[in-house]
Image (cartoon, rainbow, N blue to C red):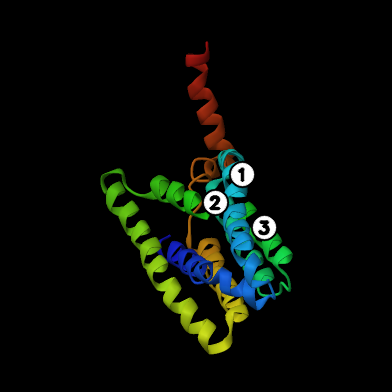
Amino acid sequence: MAFGLAGTSASYTMLIPFLPLYLMELGTPQEDVMFWSGGVFSITFFIAAVMAPIWGRFADKYGKKRMAVRAAIGLMAAYFVGGLVMSPVQLLGMRVLQGFANGFMPAVLAITSSIAPKKQMGYALGIVQTGQIIGSVMGPLMGGFISDLVGMRMSFFVASAFLLLVLLLVVFFVDDPDQGSLKHLNHPRLLLRMISAMQPAIG
Protein backbone atom coordinates (compact mmCIF):
# COMPACT_ATOMS: atom_id res chain seq x y z
CA MET A 1 0.00 0.00 0.00
CA ALA A 2 2.86 2.37 0.81
CA PHE A 3 4.54 1.67 -2.52
CA GLY A 4 1.22 2.15 -4.29
CA LEU A 5 0.64 5.55 -2.73
CA ALA A 6 4.24 6.54 -3.42
CA GLY A 7 3.73 5.73 -7.10
CA THR A 8 0.43 7.57 -7.42
CA SER A 9 1.70 10.62 -5.53
CA ALA A 10 4.90 10.79 -7.57
CA SER A 11 3.01 10.49 -10.85
CA TYR A 12 0.65 13.27 -9.77
CA THR A 13 3.22 15.76 -8.49
CA MET A 14 5.57 15.19 -11.41
CA LEU A 15 2.90 16.61 -13.72
CA ILE A 16 0.76 19.13 -11.85
CA PRO A 17 3.41 21.84 -11.21
CA PHE A 18 4.22 21.95 -14.90
CA LEU A 19 0.70 22.17 -16.35
CA PRO A 20 1.00 25.92 -17.14
CA LEU A 21 4.16 25.18 -19.13
CA TYR A 22 2.36 22.35 -20.88
CA LEU A 23 -0.46 24.72 -21.81
CA MET A 24 2.08 27.01 -23.43
CA GLU A 25 3.56 24.04 -25.25
CA LEU A 26 0.07 23.24 -26.55
CA GLY A 27 -0.11 26.70 -28.12
CA THR A 28 -2.17 28.55 -25.51
CA PRO A 29 -1.74 32.32 -25.93
CA GLN A 30 0.29 33.91 -23.15
CA GLU A 31 -2.63 36.07 -22.01
CA ASP A 32 -4.88 32.99 -21.68
CA VAL A 33 -2.50 30.73 -19.78
CA MET A 34 -3.70 31.86 -16.35
CA PHE A 35 -7.34 31.28 -17.28
CA TRP A 36 -6.71 27.79 -18.62
CA SER A 37 -4.42 26.96 -15.70
CA GLY A 38 -7.21 27.75 -13.27
CA GLY A 39 -9.60 25.61 -15.26
CA VAL A 40 -7.40 22.55 -15.59
CA PHE A 41 -6.42 22.73 -11.92
CA SER A 42 -9.90 23.16 -10.47
CA ILE A 43 -11.99 20.88 -12.69
CA THR A 44 -10.34 17.72 -11.36
CA PHE A 45 -11.04 18.60 -7.75
CA PHE A 46 -14.63 19.57 -8.55
CA ILE A 47 -15.32 16.25 -10.27
CA ALA A 48 -13.53 14.34 -7.49
CA ALA A 49 -15.65 16.08 -4.83
CA VAL A 50 -18.85 15.16 -6.64
CA MET A 51 -17.79 11.54 -7.19
CA ALA A 52 -16.27 10.88 -3.75
CA PRO A 53 -19.50 9.76 -2.01
CA ILE A 54 -20.49 7.72 -5.06
CA TRP A 55 -17.18 5.85 -5.12
CA GLY A 56 -17.48 5.39 -1.35
CA ARG A 57 -20.85 3.72 -1.81
CA PHE A 58 -19.44 1.54 -4.57
CA ALA A 59 -16.57 0.53 -2.27
CA ASP A 60 -19.09 -0.60 0.36
CA LYS A 61 -21.01 -2.56 -2.26
CA TYR A 62 -18.28 -4.03 -4.48
CA GLY A 63 -15.19 -3.96 -2.27
CA LYS A 64 -12.32 -1.64 -1.47
CA LYS A 65 -9.76 -3.46 -3.60
CA ARG A 66 -11.94 -3.13 -6.68
CA MET A 67 -12.17 0.59 -6.10
CA ALA A 68 -8.38 0.82 -5.79
CA VAL A 69 -8.03 -1.11 -9.06
CA ARG A 70 -10.63 1.13 -10.72
CA ALA A 71 -8.82 4.27 -9.62
CA ALA A 72 -5.43 2.96 -10.75
CA ILE A 73 -6.78 2.03 -14.19
CA GLY A 74 -8.53 5.38 -14.53
CA LEU A 75 -5.44 7.37 -13.56
CA MET A 76 -3.25 5.30 -15.86
CA ALA A 77 -5.61 5.99 -18.77
CA ALA A 78 -5.89 9.70 -17.90
CA TYR A 79 -2.13 10.22 -17.80
CA PHE A 80 -1.69 8.35 -21.07
CA VAL A 81 -4.32 10.54 -22.70
CA GLY A 82 -2.52 13.57 -21.27
CA GLY A 83 0.50 12.68 -23.35
CA LEU A 84 -1.63 12.67 -26.51
CA VAL A 85 -3.60 15.91 -26.14
CA MET A 86 -3.07 18.64 -28.71
CA SER A 87 -5.08 21.58 -27.31
CA PRO A 88 -6.09 23.21 -24.01
CA VAL A 89 -9.63 21.89 -24.41
CA GLN A 90 -8.34 18.34 -24.73
CA LEU A 91 -6.15 18.84 -21.67
CA LEU A 92 -9.21 20.02 -19.77
CA GLY A 93 -10.99 16.84 -20.86
CA MET A 94 -8.06 14.79 -19.61
CA ARG A 95 -8.34 16.49 -16.22
CA VAL A 96 -12.07 15.69 -16.14
CA LEU A 97 -11.20 12.04 -16.70
CA GLN A 98 -8.64 12.28 -13.93
CA GLY A 99 -11.34 13.61 -11.60
CA PHE A 100 -13.54 10.59 -12.30
CA ALA A 101 -10.55 8.32 -11.61
CA ASN A 102 -10.04 9.78 -8.15
CA GLY A 103 -10.33 7.57 -5.07
CA PHE A 104 -7.13 5.56 -4.87
CA MET A 105 -5.91 7.03 -1.59
CA PRO A 106 -9.22 6.59 0.31
CA ALA A 107 -9.39 2.99 -0.92
CA VAL A 108 -5.81 2.34 0.20
CA LEU A 109 -6.43 3.82 3.65
CA ALA A 110 -9.62 1.78 4.00
CA ILE A 111 -7.84 -1.43 2.98
CA THR A 112 -4.98 -0.71 5.37
CA SER A 113 -7.33 -0.06 8.27
CA SER A 114 -9.12 -3.34 7.48
CA ILE A 115 -6.08 -5.62 7.28
CA ALA A 116 -3.71 -4.06 9.83
CA PRO A 117 -3.69 -5.45 13.40
CA LYS A 118 -5.62 -3.17 15.73
CA LYS A 119 -2.63 -2.72 18.02
CA GLN A 120 -0.52 -1.56 15.06
CA MET A 121 -3.15 0.51 13.26
CA GLY A 122 -1.44 3.86 13.83
CA TYR A 123 1.92 2.46 12.76
CA ALA A 124 0.46 0.89 9.61
CA LEU A 125 -1.34 4.06 8.56
CA GLY A 126 1.81 6.06 9.28
CA ILE A 127 3.85 3.80 6.98
CA VAL A 128 1.28 4.15 4.21
CA GLN A 129 1.15 7.93 4.51
CA THR A 130 4.95 8.06 4.55
CA GLY A 131 4.83 6.44 1.12
CA GLN A 132 2.52 9.20 -0.06
CA ILE A 133 4.81 11.91 1.31
CA ILE A 134 7.90 10.39 -0.29
CA GLY A 135 6.12 10.24 -3.63
CA SER A 136 4.95 13.84 -3.30
CA VAL A 137 8.50 14.99 -2.58
CA MET A 138 10.13 13.01 -5.37
CA GLY A 139 7.50 13.76 -8.03
CA PRO A 140 8.40 17.39 -8.87
CA LEU A 141 12.09 16.54 -9.02
CA MET A 142 11.43 13.62 -11.34
CA GLY A 143 9.00 15.66 -13.45
CA GLY A 144 11.48 18.49 -13.89
CA PHE A 145 14.27 16.10 -14.82
CA ILE A 146 12.16 14.13 -17.32
CA SER A 147 10.68 17.28 -18.87
CA ASP A 148 14.11 18.79 -19.32
CA LEU A 149 15.49 15.57 -20.73
CA VAL A 150 12.76 14.36 -23.11
CA GLY A 151 9.95 16.91 -22.93
CA MET A 152 6.80 17.48 -20.92
CA ARG A 153 4.69 15.18 -23.07
CA MET A 154 6.84 12.19 -22.20
CA SER A 155 6.28 12.86 -18.48
CA PHE A 156 2.64 11.85 -18.91
CA PHE A 157 3.64 8.51 -20.39
CA VAL A 158 6.11 7.91 -17.55
CA ALA A 159 3.37 8.72 -15.03
CA SER A 160 1.07 6.27 -16.81
CA ALA A 161 3.78 3.60 -16.54
CA PHE A 162 4.02 4.29 -12.80
CA LEU A 163 0.29 3.69 -12.49
CA LEU A 164 0.64 0.42 -14.39
CA LEU A 165 3.15 -0.73 -11.75
CA VAL A 166 0.81 0.42 -9.00
CA LEU A 167 -2.04 -1.49 -10.62
CA LEU A 168 0.02 -4.68 -10.74
CA LEU A 169 1.01 -4.23 -7.09
CA VAL A 170 -2.61 -3.91 -6.02
CA VAL A 171 -3.88 -6.78 -8.16
CA PHE A 172 -1.23 -9.34 -7.22
CA PHE A 173 -0.01 -8.35 -3.77
CA VAL A 174 -2.96 -6.82 -1.92
CA ASP A 175 -5.53 -8.99 -0.20
CA ASP A 176 -9.16 -8.01 -0.53
CA PRO A 177 -10.43 -7.42 3.02
CA ASP A 178 -14.05 -7.52 1.85
CA GLN A 179 -13.76 -11.14 0.74
CA GLY A 180 -12.29 -12.43 3.96
CA SER A 181 -15.63 -12.85 5.66
CA LEU A 182 -17.37 -14.14 2.53
CA LYS A 183 -14.97 -16.75 1.19
CA HIS A 184 -16.11 -19.30 3.78
CA LEU A 185 -19.61 -19.22 2.31
CA ASN A 186 -18.28 -21.27 -0.58
CA HIS A 187 -18.28 -24.27 1.77
CA PRO A 188 -21.85 -25.64 2.20
CA ARG A 189 -21.14 -27.34 5.53
CA LEU A 190 -19.90 -24.12 7.08
CA LEU A 191 -22.92 -22.30 5.71
CA LEU A 192 -25.30 -24.88 7.20
CA ARG A 193 -23.58 -24.64 10.58
CA MET A 194 -23.89 -20.86 10.53
CA ILE A 195 -27.60 -21.09 9.69
CA SER A 196 -28.28 -23.71 12.37
CA ALA A 197 -26.42 -21.63 14.92
CA MET A 198 -28.56 -18.62 14.09
CA GLN A 199 -31.91 -20.45 14.39
CA PRO A 200 -32.29 -20.29 18.20
CA ALA A 201 -31.61 -16.58 18.13
CA ILE A 202 -34.11 -16.06 15.32
CA GLY A 203 -36.77 -18.12 17.10
Percent across and percent down for residue 111 are: 45, 49
Give the farthest residue toward the bottom: 149
Residue located beneath label 1 in the image: 51
> What x and y, as percent, mark residue 115?
40, 49
Nearer the observer: mark 1 or 2; the answer is: 1
Q: CA distance from mark 3 to mark 1?
A: 12 Å
Instruction: Identify residue for label 3.
Output: 97
Q: Quadrant of the N terminus?
A: bottom left
| Residue at which label 2 appears | 103
Q: Is residue 134 above or below residue 175?
A: below
Does residue 24 lie above or below 1 as drawn? below
Q: Quadrant of residue 80?
A: bottom right
Seen at 71% across and 72% down, the residue is 85
**Crowd rating for badge 2 (residues with CA inside 10 Å; few <14, some 14–19, many 20+):** many
- What's the amino acid at mark 1? Met
User: Please, what is the three-letter code of the amino acid marked with disc 2?
Assistant: Gly
Q: Decide: marks 1, 2 in contact (CB < 8 A)?
A: yes
Q: Nearer the viewer, residue 103 or 25?
A: 25
User: Could you tell me residue 91's position as x and y percent?
Assistant: 68, 65
Q: How far apart, in angstroms, are the residues tagged by discs 2 and 3? A: 12 Å
